[in-house]
């Protein structure tokens, strides 16, 4: 997986509204230098402790907090890295390094939605490769593929041509409908990193397109074995298991993906649908609630959330979700049908009957349009 390293800051003067005494500034600078030496020697825990002392001595020195965020990230303390980067921004909102580190730490903590929001201002703007990579991966996890692809390409072209980033770019271009550029990058990945985990996923994608789901799953599992943290690898295993009706294995793989990327929308969607299909709506509800926050404009999310509420016996909440679904897609008969059921479940019979009539009318229109398409002539009136 691409190494999203947090960025150390260049230490300037303390930036608090009221500077600490000169002796405290000097002590903080000495401690920061010691921390840098300890980190260079590989003793990250000691470096963090020394830098915490420095930050306590000069609490308004924002760059100390940026560097502390970078060290916490090295120790996989992403919550601490987020806290320190946010604290640096609170002192100096113009400090790009703090915002870079905040977004990267949010992504590494599995919160792609927060990372995308934090780093949105750097889309199309000159910034470090790690920042563009984090932005691109966060947008890809949210299925915002057309926005994801430029950031991922910028990261590759300004940094190392990492196979994981090339894989993410290929999938983003494919999802955005740019097959020609996806093929160019696919050829480059296979040429430059033929034995990588990313190349194995590409191999699996080709087999999946040919409906060789067993072969695709085998390739995806080899990719997971080669790099268990590769974004999208567990999801790919889950999707082929789902297609092969091996639902327990699919659910396990989707959950493994979500353990790495808590805001990975495709895994949330398929896991929720799987739980609904298995008659476990209460398990599906929190997944779909999370997805509705990530993709509030997607009517299918609201429709499935309404269905889950309805099947879980939570009819009033189902009415609210399904009204949002039909507002976003008024021509979807399934949304109207489910809304009718939900309205009847809360005793609103007349409104429920009207929603059912809308569903029937829309289904009839779909049948007529299909008949016209097949026959080449409109149906008799």
Image (spheres, helix red, strand yellow):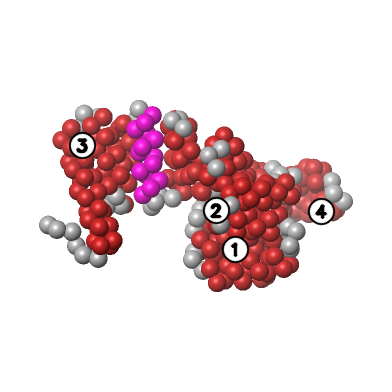
Q: Are marks 4 and 3 in contact (CB under 8 Å)?
A: no
Q: Helix or strand or loop: what does disc 1 sit on?
A: helix
Residue at x 48%, y 38% (from the top left corner): 274
Residue 219 location (% of width, % of height): 67, 51
Q: Is residue 138 above or below residue 262?
A: below
Image disc number at residue 169: 1
Residue 282 location (% of width, % of height): 44, 30
Q: Earlier in the sequence, mark 4 or mark 2?
A: 4
Neighbours of disc 4 within 10 Å: few (<14), some (14-19), many (20+): many
Q: Helix or strand or loop: what does disc 4 sit on?
A: helix
Residue placed most toward the observer, 91 or 366: 366
Neighbours of disc 3 within 10 Å: few (<14), some (14-19), many (20+): many
Residue placed most toward the observer, 314 or 304: 304
Image disc number at residue 211: 2
Image disc number at residue 352: 3
Q: Earlier in the sequence, mark 1 or mark 4?
A: 4
Q: Which residues are magenta?
A: 299-312
Residue at x 39%, y 41% (from the top left corner): 304
Q: Quadrant of the N terminus?
A: bottom right
Cα–Cα span, label 2 and label 1: 23 Å
Cα–Cα span, label 1 and label 4: 35 Å
Cα–Cα span, label 3 and label 1: 46 Å
């Amino acid at each position: 997986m691409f190494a999203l390293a947090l960025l150390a800051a260049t230490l300037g003067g303390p930036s608090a509204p009221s500077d600490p005494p000169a002796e405290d500034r000097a002590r903080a600078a000495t401690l920061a230098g010691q921390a840098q030496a300890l980190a260079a020697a590989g003793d990250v825990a000691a470096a963090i402790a020394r830098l915490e002392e420095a930050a306590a001595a000069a609490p308004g020195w924002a760059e100390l907090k940026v560097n502390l965020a970078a060290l916490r990230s090295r120790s996989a303390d992403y919550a601490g890295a987020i806290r320190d980067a946010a604290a640096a921004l609170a002192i100096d909102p113009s400090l790009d390094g703090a915002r870079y580190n905040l977004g990267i730490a949010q992504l590494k903590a599995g919160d792609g939605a927060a990372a995308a929001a934090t780093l949105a201002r750097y889309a199309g703007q000159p910034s470090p490769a790690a920042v563009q990579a984090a932005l691109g991966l966060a947008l890809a996890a949210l299925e915002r593929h057309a926005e994801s692809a430029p950031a991922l390409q910028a990261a590759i072209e300004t940094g190392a041509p990492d196979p994981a980033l090339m894989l993410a770019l290929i999938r983003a271009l494919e999802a955005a409908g740019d097959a020609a550029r996806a093929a160019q990058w696919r050829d480059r990945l296979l040429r430059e990193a033929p034995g990588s985990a990313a190349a194995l996923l590409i191999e699996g994608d080709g087999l999946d397109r040919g409906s060789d789901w067993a072969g695709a799953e085998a390739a995806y599992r080899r990719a997971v074995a080669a790099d268990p943290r590769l974004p999208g690898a567990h999801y790919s295993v889950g999707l082929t298991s789902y297609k092969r009706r091996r639902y327990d294995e699919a659910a396990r793989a989707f959950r493994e993906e979500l353990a790495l990327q808590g805001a990975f929308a495709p895994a949330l969607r398929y896991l929720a649908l799987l739980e609904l299909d298995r008659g476990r709506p209460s398990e599906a509800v929190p997944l779909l609630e999370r997805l509705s926050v990530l993709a509030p404009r997607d009517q299918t999310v609201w429709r499935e959330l309404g269905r889950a509420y309805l099947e879980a016996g939570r009819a009033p909440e189902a009415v609210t979700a399904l009204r949002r679904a039909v507002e976003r897609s008024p021509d979807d008969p399934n949304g109207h049908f489910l809304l009718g059921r939900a309205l009847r479940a809360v005793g609103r019979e007349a409104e429920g009957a009207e929603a059912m009539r809308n569903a029937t009318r829309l289904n009839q229109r779909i049948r007529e349009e299909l008949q016209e398409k097949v026959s080449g002539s409109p149906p008799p009136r």
